[in-house]
Amino acid sequence: MYHDLPSTASFWSFLFTIDQDLAEKTRKQGCPCGGRLHCANYPRQPRGDDDQLPKPQRIRLSFCCDRDGCRKRVTPPSVRFLGRKVYLGAIVILISAMRQGPSPRRVRELSRRFGADRRTIARWQVFWRERFPQTPFWKIARARLVSLAEIVALPYALVDAFLSRHRRCKGWTLLLRFLAPITIPGALRIEVSR
Ligand SMILES: [Zn+2]
């Protein structure tokens, strides 16, 4: 059973550097209109993260096109933020996965620590059970996980696929990278949480 995230601050900092790399790649590609992308990050205050995330990292990296008449916002994929909402992706995954496991007491502990109430967690469950499997991303990505004999319960099966083969920190990093394509605004067209 996977019952916690890597606890070190260096894990979150490491994820932030991955986000910076992903952002740089996006910036270099420029706007689809041919315009240049300028930095237009927006603040994020993830719930219950006070000691998890240093202040300078509480931003979603994002850009804005510099061309008049376009000014389109372009937001790169992220290994930290899932969807548009305030929880860190890893927390949404972990708590949802644990709901499918045998230790409700740990779920309560984690929920308290990250400030996620029952209704929020229930919404996450709906997301993993009903929405996520319908995404174009998953329909394709699923084939890349062929070594999984059967994917019975999401996201537990995903956590298991990555963490059973790697140490905790590496496993989480790989899993979050794997899911990064769905973090682009519009990729899901749903709200992960409120
Ligand atoms: Zn543009």
Image (cartoon, helix red, strand yellow):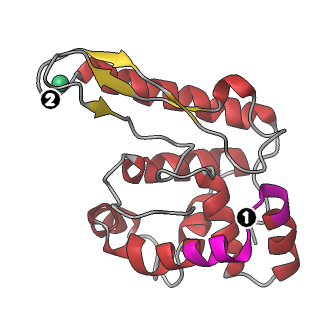
The C terminus sits in image quarter? bottom right
- Would you say residue 115 sits in the magenta stretch? yes
Mark 2 or mark 1: whose residue is earlier in sequence: 2
Say above or below: 56 vs 80.
Answer: above
Q: What residue type is disc 1 on?
A: Ala
Q: What residue type is disc 2 on?
A: Pro
Give me the residue at 78% from left, 85% from top: 102
CA neighbours of label 2 inside 10 A, class few (<14), some (14 to 19), many (20+): few
Q: Could you say where residue 23 lies in the image, as x and y percent from the top left?
A: 41, 27
**What's the magenta bit mostly, secondary-structure-wise?**
helix
Element on which disc 1 rests: loop
Q: Which residues are magenta?
A: 112-123
Contact (CB < 8 A) between labels 2 and 1? no
Q: Which residue is mark 2?
A: 32
Say above or below: 45 vs 132.
Answer: above
Say above or below: 14 vs 180.
Answer: above
Q: Is residue 65 visible?
A: yes
Q: Is residue 97 left or right of residue 8?
A: left
The answer to whether the beta carbon of the residue marked 2 is less than 8 Å from any atom of ligand 1 is yes
Q: Could you say where residue 80 lies in the image, as x and y percent from the top left?
A: 57, 43
The N terminus sits in image quarter? bottom right
Q: Which residue is mark 1?
A: 116
